[in-house]
Image (tube, rainbow, N blue to C red):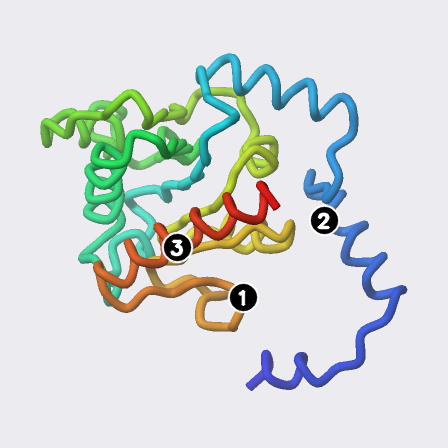
Amino acid sequence: LAWQSWLKEPWSLEKERRVDHDLSLRGLKKLPDKEIKETHKDIINQLKLDINKPIVLAFTGVAWDATSNFPSEAYKNMYEWLWDTINWFKENPDIQLIIRVHPGENIAININPENRTRFEIETNSKKIKVPANVHIVSFDNPVSAYDLFHIATLGMVYSSTTGLEMACLGLPVITIGQAHYSNKGFTYDPKSRKEYFDILRNSISNRSENACS
C-alpha cells in the first residue's frame, strides 16, 4: 500500500536532484567520471574480462542471513540458485558472469572461522566446476560493488539490497528470493527455474541489441 501511494506522488526536478545526491553519497553515480573509468579498466584487466561480451553481475548474501535461506518460488535457497546459474554459464561461454561474494561473509563474531559458511568453500565441496567465463570475486577482494555496477549488462541477486542499488542506476535486475523491493514493478521476479533462465537469456539479448543499435 505504501508503494502504491508513492506511485501517485508527483515527481519534480528537485526530487530528481535529491535522489541523485543521496545516491552519490552512497557511492553511486549515474555517469562515471574519469577516475571511475580508470577503475573500471583496472577491474576488466584484473578479471580478464572481454568487453565485447555481455557481463552479468551476481551478488551473494551471507549464509547466516535468514533471507538467503528462505525458499523462493524458483529455488530452495541462495546457494542452489548460484550453483545452477554457474552451470548455465558453463553452457553459454559467450556470456560472462561475475559473482561478487559478500564482503561480510567472513565476519561472524559468534562463529569460529573454521565453521563459517563461505561460498567458495561450499562450491568446492560440492565439486562445482567453475568455467573460464565465470569470475568469482572473493569476500576479501577490495574491489567495490559500486564499481562493478557500471561494467555490467545485467544484475542478479537472491535478496541483497545491491539489487535495489543497481536498479537505481538503470540496470535490469533479476531478484530470486524475497527481497523487500521485489514485485514492485522495476525488477524481474521469476516464479520458476524456467522463467528465470528465459528472463536471463532475453534480458542479455535485449541489452546487446540496444548496445549495437
Return the disc, 1 or 2, that comes first in the chain's sequence: 2
The amino acid sitting under disc 2 is Leu
Question: In the image, residue 144 lies at what x, y percent?
Answer: 57, 29
Q: Which mark is residue 23?
A: 2
Q: Of circles 1 and 2, which is in front?
A: 1
Q: Is residue 6 above or below residue 68?
A: below
Q: Is residue 177 above or below residue 78?
A: below
The amino acid sitting under disc 1 is Phe
Q: Is residue 167 left or right of residue 108?
A: right
Q: Is residue 175 above or below residue 116?
A: below
Q: Residues within 10 Å of mark 1 (few under 14, many from 20)?
A: some
Q: Which mark is residue 202?
A: 3
Residue drawn at x 40%, y 41% as measured from the top left: 58
Residue drawn at x 33%, y 57% as measured from the top left: 67
CB under 8 Å between discs 1 and 2: no
Q: Of circles 2 and 3, which is in front?
A: 3
Rounded to the nearest angstrom, the CA distance separating label 1 from label 3 is 16 Å
Residue drawn at x 64%, y 49% as measured from the top left: 169
Please identify the quarter of the rendering in which residue 43 is found: top right
Rounded to the nearest angstrom, the CA distance separating label 1 from label 2 is 17 Å
Q: Is residue 143 above or below residue 196?
A: above
What element does badge 2 sit on?
helix
Q: Which residue is mark 1?
A: 186
Rounded to the nearest angstrom, the CA distance separating label 2 from label 3 is 28 Å
Of 46 and 4, the residue lying toward us: 46
What element does badge 1 sit on?
loop
Q: Is residue 94 visible?
A: yes
